[in-house]
Image (cartoon, grey):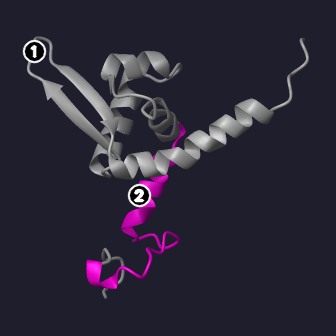
């Protein structure tokens, strides 16, 4: 196997080495754990959403950053994108099977944090 090449199905017992800079899985990890990647995966856990619905559900994200994040997650195979031929076009996003599998532990982490975090004192 050449260094940095994706693993073939015949080499299914081996794993990617994400600590290597040339590992293809490293980019996926970077996109998932980016500031906005996590929020997009969490937002799409419950339902497929249109672009504007995603933008409204993730407070603080700009349209530019949402578009860049979605583009990366679609390219990584975590998110699917469907364009409806209307004027203007309506674009819907949802999680692929891979995206759902990656997003579930993130959702569990968020649930634990929001359920177990002690209340803050009023200031």
Residue 14 position within the rendered picture, expressed as x and y whole percent measured from the top left = 42, 82
Residue 60 position within the rendered picture, expressed as x and y whole percent measured from the top left = 53, 20
Whether residue 46 is situated above or below residue 27 in the rendered picture:
above
Residue carrying label 1: 86
Name the secondary structure under disc 2: helix
Image side of residue 122 versus residue 63, left or right:
right
Q: Earlier in the sequence, mark 2 or mark 1?
A: 2
Name the foreground residue: 11 vs 62.
11
Could you say which quadrant of the image residue 90 lies in? top left
Could you say which quadrant of the image residue 106 lies in? top right
Whether residue 53 is situated above or below residue 38 in the rendered picture:
above
Quarter of the figure with the C terminus: top right
Residue occupying image coordinates x 40% and y 22%:
54
Name the foreground residue: 101 vs 54.
101
- Graded by Cα atoms within 10 Å as few (under 14), some (14 to 19) or many (20 or more), the crowding at tag 2 reads some
Residue occupying image coordinates x 37% and y 22%:
63
- In the image as oriented, which residue stretches furthest toward the bottom? 1
User: Which mark lies nearer to you, 2 or 1?
Assistant: 1
Name the secondary structure under disc 1: loop
Residue 28 position within the rendered picture, expressed as x and y whole percent measured from the top left = 41, 56
Magenta residues, start to end:
9-35
Name the foreground residue: 42 vs 30.
42
Residue 19 on the magenta segment:
yes
- Graded by Cα atoms within 10 Å as few (under 14), some (14 to 19) or many (20 or more), the crowding at tag 1 reads few
Residue carrying label 2: 27
Residue 32 position within the rendered picture, expressed as x and y whole percent measured from the top left = 47, 48
Whether residue 102 is situated above or below residue 65 in the rendered picture:
below
Image side of residue 68 versus residue 45, left or right:
left
Residue occupying image coordinates x 49% and y 69%:
18
Residue 21 on the magenta segment:
yes
Image side of residue 99 versus residue 114, left or right:
left
């Amino acid at each position: 196997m050449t260094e940095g090449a994706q693993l073939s199905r015949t080499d299914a017992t081996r794993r990617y080495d994400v600590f290597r800079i040339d590992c293809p899985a490293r980019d996926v990890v970077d996109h998932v754990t980016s500031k906005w990647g996590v929020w997009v995966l969490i937002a799409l856990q419950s339902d497929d959403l249109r672009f504007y619905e995603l933008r409204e559900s993730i407070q603080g994200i700009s349209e530019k950053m949402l578009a860049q994040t979605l583009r990366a997650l679609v390219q990584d195979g975590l998110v699917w994108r469907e364009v409806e031929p209307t004027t203007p076009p309506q674009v819907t996003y949802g999680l692929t099977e891979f995206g759902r599998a990656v997003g579930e532990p993130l959702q569990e982490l968020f649930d634990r944090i929001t359920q177990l975090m002690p209340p803050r004192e009023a200031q």
